[in-house]
Amino acid sequence: MANKTKIFLSSVGQSSLDAIRQDLFTGLKEMGHDPLRFEDNFGPWGRDAIERCLQKVEESDIYLLIVSDKMGTYLEHEQRTVTHLEFEKAFQTDKQVLVFVEEQVKSKFFSLLRSPMETRIFEWEQTHRNEPDFYLDIVKNVIDQDLLPKEKDSITYIDDYIWAFLYDIMYKGYYLESISLARSPLDTIKEYLSEMLKMGSQYLAIEKDIITNAKASDELWGLKQITFDFIDLLKDGEITNWRKFLATLKYHMVGHPIIKHEGTYMQYEIGSYGNCKALTLYRKENDQLKLIEGEGLFDHKNNSYDLTDKTSYVVETYNNEGKNLFYREDKQLLYYTVKANDFVLCFHYPLDSSWNKEKVKQLHDEVFGAIMNRQDEQYRDFAIKLLGGLKHDKES
């Protein structure tokens, strides 16, 4: 007898989510799956119950998270809520994660909180030279100092912790699906599960092929999406929204392992670089490279560089007509720079503290290869070709 798919239902135990949790539990069970939720599976509440929750997450195949306006039980010694710990366990154990956020909460997060949080996190990193353990204090500063009184009033019913939680989910690379509390996301979940079942039933017997085809499918789908997104930003030979252009490209720039002796039986991982933290775009105007726009966490001090500036990475790339890799040990950032006619794109990738300038120099080819030999490079090349075909109405 085949094992049932275990689906962990995670959310705060607030009354407004009771109906959705029940509908999901019943619906998934009727479909023949094995839904797991605290009220049915884990026994009385307490520290042992928390450990059982995390164990159940690890045992599950799919982790399904619903986020609304309440934070739930906060554990002082962990500095996390129980729901957040469940999410962390799912992330650490590489579960298939589906995240649904109440639509008003999601809207407020992206319209009011996300951008000032990114700015303050960047400032925090510049001061402390590492990433914050969590973002709750940063959220409080944003609300107290960055939001208008009317904006603050519009989110008073939402726990501050929710903004930090959502940022953590987004930072770890998960998509936030919208959900209305008036209707269950069961139909959407059925679509996800149906797609998984269809692929599994067709290709279970050819596992190697399914992995290869899945990668190719992801690449083609990603290229299709980014093509449509970029075309929507084109008008009369120019980009109409540079910030959105960069944000679209940055979204696809994810971290990868760095491999020694790649492609041989002796290959092994020597480190990794993280998701792209920032993306900046410069264009030649007269005798300078001027910053057109930036997306993410980057240093705003230098908005232009003279073309004779030998200390500038973007100038060196413009003058050398190629693709270059630079490293700033004080910021622990890789800068991957690419020229496209009058433009220079600069990608900012973080490295962990085990790397220094000498190590990057010694392993330059491996680091460069990790960035180049990935699906990301297809997206970058497409963006570069697009930039090369734009009108050049600036004096050059």
Image (cartoon, rainbow, N blue to C red):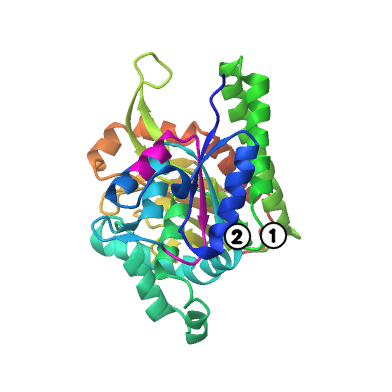
Is 17 above or below relative to 192?
Answer: below
User: The N terminus lies in which quarter of the figure?
Assistant: top right
Q: Residue at x 66, y 41 (%)?
A: 190
Q: Residues within 10 Å of mark 1 (few under 14, many from 20)?
A: some
Q: Position of residue 330 (x, y in %)?
A: 25, 53
* Whether residue 214 can be seen here: yes
Please name which of the two marks, 1 or 2, marks the residue nearer to the observer: 2
Q: Position of residue 276 (x, y in %)?
A: 45, 49
Residue closer to the observer: 205 or 143: 205
Residue closer to the observer: 122 or 165: 165
* Whether residue 286 can be seen here: no
Relative to 152, is 230 on the left or the right? right
- For the residues bearing labels 1 and 2, Cβ distance under 8 angstroms: no
Q: Position of residue 52 (x, y in %)?
A: 35, 42
Badge 1 is on which residue?
Answer: 238
Query: First in sequence: mark 1 or mark 2?
Result: 1
Q: Residues within 10 Å of mark 2 (few under 14, many from 20)?
A: some
Badge 2 is on which residue?
Answer: 244
Mark 1 is on which residue type? Glu
Q: Residue at x 49, y 34 (%)?
A: 61
Is 155 above or below relative to 132?
Answer: below
Q: Considering the numbered disc 2 on the image, is that residue within a helix, a strand or a loop?
A: helix
Is 31 above or below relative to 330?
Answer: above
Which range of residues does the magenta coloring cover? 52-71
Q: Residue at x 47, y 80 (%)?
A: 152
In the image, is residue 54 part of the stretch drawn in magenta?
Answer: yes
Mark 2 is on which residue type? Lys
Relative to 106, is 46 on the left or the right? left
Q: Quadrant of residue 73?
A: bottom left
Q: Position of residue 332 (x, y in %)?
A: 30, 49
